[in-house]
Amino acid sequence: MTDEPTITTARLILRPWHAGDATALHQLAGRREIADTMISVPHPFTLEYATEWIVGTGHAHAKGHALHFAITEAPTGSLVGAAELRSIDTVHSHAELSFWIGVNWWGQGFATEVVHALVRHGFDQLHLNRILAYHMVRNPASGQVLKKAGLQQEGLLRQCVKKWSQFEDVVLMAVLHDDWRSQNRPNGCADLP
Ligand SMILES: CC(C)(COP(=O)(O)OP(=O)(O)OC[C@H]1O[C@@H](n2cnc3c(N)ncnc32)[C@H](O)[C@@H]1OP(=O)(O)O)[C@@H](O)C(=O)NCCC(=O)NCCS
């Protein structure tokens, strides 16, 4: 694998994780609101787990399995969330998108900015054919973020996961390269009619 990439958006820098992020990660991901709609985020999210998880992001990249990004605010460098393209399948050219934004930054369009950038990165740099994501039915904000980035609903997976001892219905969403390309010029501007 090549070096872990950094992606710059209008307000954010998506960069590789560093060992020094562990405390901030522990504080942000430790909020129950993050674990509430994420299967991959345990609760409690201890400092030890944060430290080990960051080490794991480097291993996943080295094996070509995933690209993990620390989402930071461009002016301050403060950690505001996490995003990844994971389950990268080079045979079938697809990967799964996953993301969360720290509670204090919700509602500012940060997830929208991140997901647009990762979809572009997945298609332009990783040459994926398909990018998919899952969200719980009771998490419509995530569905809205994904829809705005071009993903469309492909299925409803009834009682697919268990959270807080309750089975949850999950929506499967995805976007194909050809569909995305037809909606986006290479420079990022939407095609004119
Ligand atoms: C879901 C999450 C990522 C959204 O992050 P965010 O930065 O607040 O998202 P944005 O501000 O970019 O966009 C949120 C969109 O959802 C919409 N929204 C918010 N609540 C909504 C609701 N109850 N129903 C429908 N849409 C809703 C907002 O209006 C906005 O859409 P708009 O810009 O078209 O108006 C964030 O709440 C989060 O991290 N949650 C916990 C982890 C998680 O669920 N991650 C996703 C797992 S799939």
Image (tube, rainbow, N blue to C red):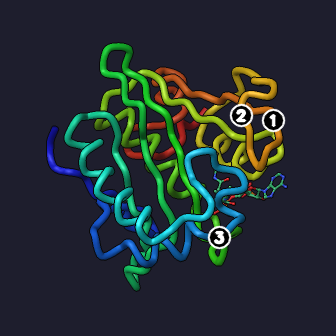
How far apart, in angstroms, are the residues tagged by discs 3 and 1? 21 Å
Image vertical order of residue 73 relative to residue 1, above or below: below
Which amino acid, mark 2? Val
Q: Are marks 2 and 1 in contact (CB under 8 Å)?
A: yes
Give the residue displayed 80% in from the left and 37% down from the top: 168
Splitting the image into 4 quarters, where does residue 183 fall? top right
Q: Where is residue 2 in the image (x, y as percent from the top left)?
A: 14, 42
Q: Looking at the image, which residue sits at the far top?
A: 91
For mark 3, give the secondary structure. loop
Earlier-in-chain disc, 2 versus 1 = 2
Give the residue displayed 74% in from the left and 45% down from the top: 163
Question: Is disc 2's CB within 8 Å of ligand 1?
Answer: no
Residue at which label 2 appears: 161
Q: Position of residue 134 (x, y in %)?
A: 64, 35
Can you tell me which quadrant of the image ligand 1 is in?
bottom right
Earlier-in-chain disc, 2 versus 3 = 3
Residue at which label 3 appears: 31
